[in-house]
Image: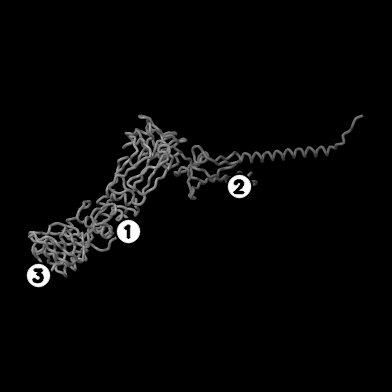
Amino acid sequence: MAIRSTRSPRRARRNVLWGLLAVIVLALLGLVAGALLWSGITLGGDAVALARVEVQPFGGKLERVRAFGPGGQRIPLAVRDGRLTPRTLLTPGETVSVEAVVRRPGWLGWALGSERHVQQTIRAPVANVSERWLTVPSGSRVQVRFDGPVSAVGYGRVRRRPLGGSSLTLGPRPPAGTVAVAAAARTWERLGRPVTVSWFPPADAPVALSSPQPGAHLAPATPIRLTFSEPVDDALGGDRPQLSPHTPGRWTQPDSHTLLFVPSGFGAPFDSELRLALPRAVAVAGASGSGLRTTRRIAWTVPPGSTLRLQQLLAQAGYLPLGWTAAGAAVPHTPQAELQAAVDPPQGHFSWRYPNTPHELQALWGEGDWNQITRGAVMMFQDTHGLTVDAIPGAQVWHALLADAIAGKRRDGGYSYVYVRSSVPTLLTLWHNGQTVLTSPGNTGVPAAPTQHGSFPVFEHIPVGTMSGTNPDGSHYHDPGIRWISYFNGGDAIHSFNRASFGTPQSLGCVELPLDSAAKVWPYTPIGTLVTIE
């Protein structure tokens, strides 16, 4: 017996419609999923450009891209084939914030929004030197290797040179030496921070490079750098070198192969040999990196302070009748800058401080020459600062001068000069700060004990004292209570004396003045004041 279906034609049609609807929904969902899957945007680094932006087929159109540096400054970009290349040079390692905006297609924008923003922080690549301390056999070229491709390098006097590889071969070089190498990984980068690369010849002992070179002249505040072919602890056994004479400062170790001594205060003494004792023997490269010498001692020469710079400082401090003006920028008021200037004086010019400076005084001056004007100024400076008055610009004088220069101290006592005409009638003229203060008759030495001609600085200055000595006939004299004494040459002095007349040779070498004239002259003739006898 046949079984008849209970499903009605209407119900069957409804099922077909539902099936079609399900297929349509699934198709739409698949379409949406495909659109979402193929409408993405990616932003990331690139092997050539700063970044690369990729928009998938349904992603839309790249509307704009912007880049900002660490301080928020705008970085202009060139966009080509999705690659973003800076139009200005960036610093290696610089962090850049990149933002890309894509406009979606209209049919997708109504659901997901008309624009999509993508942001990424990217670091500009850095080309690092793979090995900073190299052993280079004799006759071989120095080859500097990097950890990746390099577009440009700078070294020595070469400011920027295209490279296009991952190694740099230097031209002819001495057997040992150092060079600062800077690199840029990309064409759109400036050169990075220089890195010192050192090379050494093969040797039985650790090789040391010294900067400054052994035996060289160095300023008191010049840092001393020792670079070893081996790590410092291996080369020296963990101990530190010792400097003599004692020099204030501090040893540091900037890296595993380098020791650096930075002087402090006024550094090494002027006019000295600075010696460095090493705890172990090393092979020290000589001048220009040649001629290894195994030793435990390295020495340099600290030159004396420059006479020209001494005069410049004395002029600036008010101890000379001249002023000095730098031709360029003034020397910074720091110990290191002033110490460097002391051995390498800056350019500038001297000028007389007073328009009517006596020509006799002007004739004594010589720029850069040790002369009586400079000698007197040093003595006055020593006396003012409580130093031994010996006219020698030693370490104490230099340190005090530099300290005054750094502090901007200046003497305000003015400048005096005494001129004595020994021909009859004998006259003394006192000049101070461009003015003639006094002209007085005086007595100079008799023919048997003449007053020596020349220019001399006052070296002793006392208000009252006893003068004694030997007369031309061999007898002795002893005169207590002599007033207003300024010794300028051995036993010769300007002082008061009780005479019936003045203006002729009557003394035993001194310049005798009436009491009132001597009293006026004395305050103007402190230690260091120049006295000219003609």
Residue closest to the eye, 366 or 122: 366
Disc nearest the viewer among 1 and 2: 1
Give the quarter of the figure containing the C terminus: bottom left
Q: Which of marks 2 and 3 is nearer the N terminus?
A: 2
Q: In this view, does 253 lie above or below 325?
A: above
* Quadrant in the rendering for residue 23: top right
Q: Earlier in the sequence, mark 1 or mark 3?
A: 1
As drawn, is 514 to the left or to the right of 202?
A: left
SS class, disc 1: loop
Percent across and percent down for residue 368 are 23, 51
Q: Is residue 418 above or below residue 287?
A: below
Residue closest to the eye, 13 or 115: 115
Determine contact: label 1, label 3, CB under 8 Å: no
Q: In this view, does 409 lie above or below 150?
A: below
Q: Which amino acid does label 1 sit on?
A: Gly
Q: Which amino acid does label 2 sit on?
A: Ser
Give the quarter of the figure containing the N terminus: top right
* Quadrant in the rendering for residue 40: top right
Disc nearest the viewer among 2 and 3: 3
Q: What residue is at 56 percent from the left and 39 percent from the top? A: 54
As drawn, is 227 to the left or to the right of 353?
A: right
* Quadrant in the rendering for residue 465: bottom left
**Residue underneath mark 3:** 500
Q: Residue 302 carries which label?
A: none
Q: What residue type is labelled 3?
A: Ala
**Residue underneath mark 1:** 408
